[in-house]
Image (tube, rainbow, N blue to C red):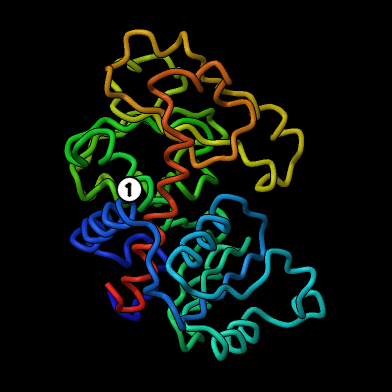
Amino acid sequence: MKNKNLVAITDFTREEYLRILELAAEFEAKPRQDILNGYVISTLFFEPSTRTRLSFETAINGLGGRVIGFSDSGATSASKGETLHDTIKMVSNYADLIVMRHPLEGSARLASEVSSVPIVNAGDGANQHPTQTLLDLYSIVKTQGTLENLKIFMVGDLKYGRTVHSLLQAMSKFSPTFYFISPDELKMPATYKLFLDKLGISYFEGKDLTEHLTEADIIYMTRVQQERFTDPIEYERVKNAYILRRSMLDGCKESMKVLHPLPRVNEIHTDVDASPHAYYFDQARNGVFVRMAILTSILGIK
């Protein structure tokens, strides 16, 4: 994985996924190490972020590295009209690796084509979020003991949700069954269903969240993303399409876990937080260890 870009989850192989998860477990056991001493990592966030940015910076600091970058593109030369091409060319002179979030789909791929150092995609529009997917895989294997033959329910914004797009592609290597629950306006795009069809992977589509819920190993809730809508009326119509409540989890498998990439708005009621099925805050914590594994693998340290 040394010097490899991570732009889409498909840039890594099944074996590389498993290696990242193995390293993440090592870092969870020993999160304070000095192995990034002397390395400079740039975090370029052209779009708001809390968990992804802070977990990357926590990972870098925990391993002794230095962070440079920004969380507000309005305070950079981008506000003066500097192109993404030029920003990446410039920043790659200063850093050993660039972590980037950008609102435009394909921006991370463009960055990887012009950068002289590896690019890690921290989210590009509605396209991909591969580091979130790897922490999702780590959360799944920690709670289920396996990645194989699981029933994964994806709920909410499946059209614009980059986390579900990446997770679908990664889990496809482990013989899953998918259940896609969404309003018609936010259905899983046809390109991803065609991807599953070609692999012979089963999936079901529906609108009723409670139907078949007792069969779930993982319920992956998503926020309806207001920032992806051009029509505010459409957003208002679907924003509260699904609200998961604790009472809805009665009869679910004891080992079933509820995941969410966060932030949540209304889609998981707070009464779920105290349920043994709730795992989304632990899931966010797992991001630190997984991102330690990603950074050290790409830099050739581990």
Q: To which quarter of the image does residue 93 belong?
A: bottom right
Residue nearer the viewer, 46 or 227 = 46
Q: Quadrant of the N terminus?
A: bottom left
Q: Which residue occupies 31% across, 46% down?
A: 137
- In the displayed structure, 98 sits above or below 140; it is below
Across and down, in percent, residue 95 comes to: 53, 83
Q: Which residue is mark 1?
A: 194
- In the displayed structure, 137 sits above or below 266; it is below
Q: To which quarter of the image does residue 188 belong?
A: top left
- In the displayed structure, 297 sits above or below 32; it is below
The tally of labels here is 1
Across and down, in percent, residue 287 comes to: 43, 51
Residue nearer the viewer, 162 or 193 = 162
Q: Which residue occupies 37% across, 45% down?
A: 136
Across and down, in percent, residue 87 comes to: 64, 83
- In the displayed structure, 157 sits above or below 290; it is above
Residue 166 in the figure: left or right of residue 253: right
Count residues near mark 1 (Cα–Cα under 10 Å), then give few for <14, some for 14-19, many for 20+.
few
Residue nearer the viewer, 52 or 213 = 52
Q: Which residue occupies 69% across, 47% down?
A: 227
Residue 151 in the figure: left or right of residue 192: left
Looking at numbered disc 1 in the image, what kind of residue is underneath it?
Answer: Leu
Residue nearer the viewer, 207 or 57 = 57
Q: Which residue occupies 41% across, 75% down?
A: 36
Across and down, in percent, residue 205 comes to: 38, 28
| Badge 1 element | helix
Q: Quadrant of the C terminus?
A: bottom left
